[in-house]
Image (tube, grey):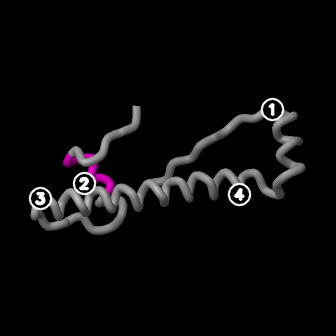
Amino acid sequence: MHTSYTVGITTGEYKALQNVMVDQNEWITNALQNRARIATEAIQNQYTTYKINKGEAITAIGSTAIIEAAYAEGVIGIAT
């Protein structure tokens, strides 16, 4: 699965960004991917600790499966 975001900025904001960065799309993509990486690592650590503390095996394989299991088992929730 793939999710896309569209961000709107004013002409002035765009022109200002042209002064400080070469590729605005690359910058925002990198920022989102890096934040997602940090969140993924945190969830994996939380879920692993949770399962170890309960004395249960970790059967989820791969980062997406671990994230989905963490949601399903109530280890994490959607930010509100």
Viewer-proximal residue among 73 and 5: 73
- Classify residue 69 as left or right of residue 40: left
Tag 4: Cα neighbours inside 10 Å, few (<14), some, or many (≥20)? few
Q: Examine the rendered structure and indicate whether residue 2 appears above or below residue 63.
A: above
**Residue 16 at x, y percent in the picture:** 87, 42
- The residue drawn where x is 56% and y is 57% is 33
The residues bearing labels 2 and 4 have C-alpha atoms spaced at a distance of 31 Å
Is residue 72 on the magenta stretch? yes
Query: What's the mark number on residue 10?
Result: 1
**Amino acid type at image mark 3:** Lys
Q: Residue 74 occupies which quadrant of the picture?
A: top left
The residue wearing badge 4 is 26
Viewer-proximal residue among 5 and 12: 12
The residue wearing badge 3 is 54
Q: Residue 45 occupies which quadrant of the picture?
A: bottom left
The residues bearing labels 2 and 3 have C-alpha atoms spaced at a distance of 15 Å
Which residues fall within the magenta stretch? 67-73
**Residue 61 at x, y percent in the picture:** 27, 68
- The residue drawn where x is 30% and y is 46% is 76
The residue wearing badge 2 is 69
Which of the two labelled residues, at mark 1 and mark 4, occupies the earlier sequence position?
1
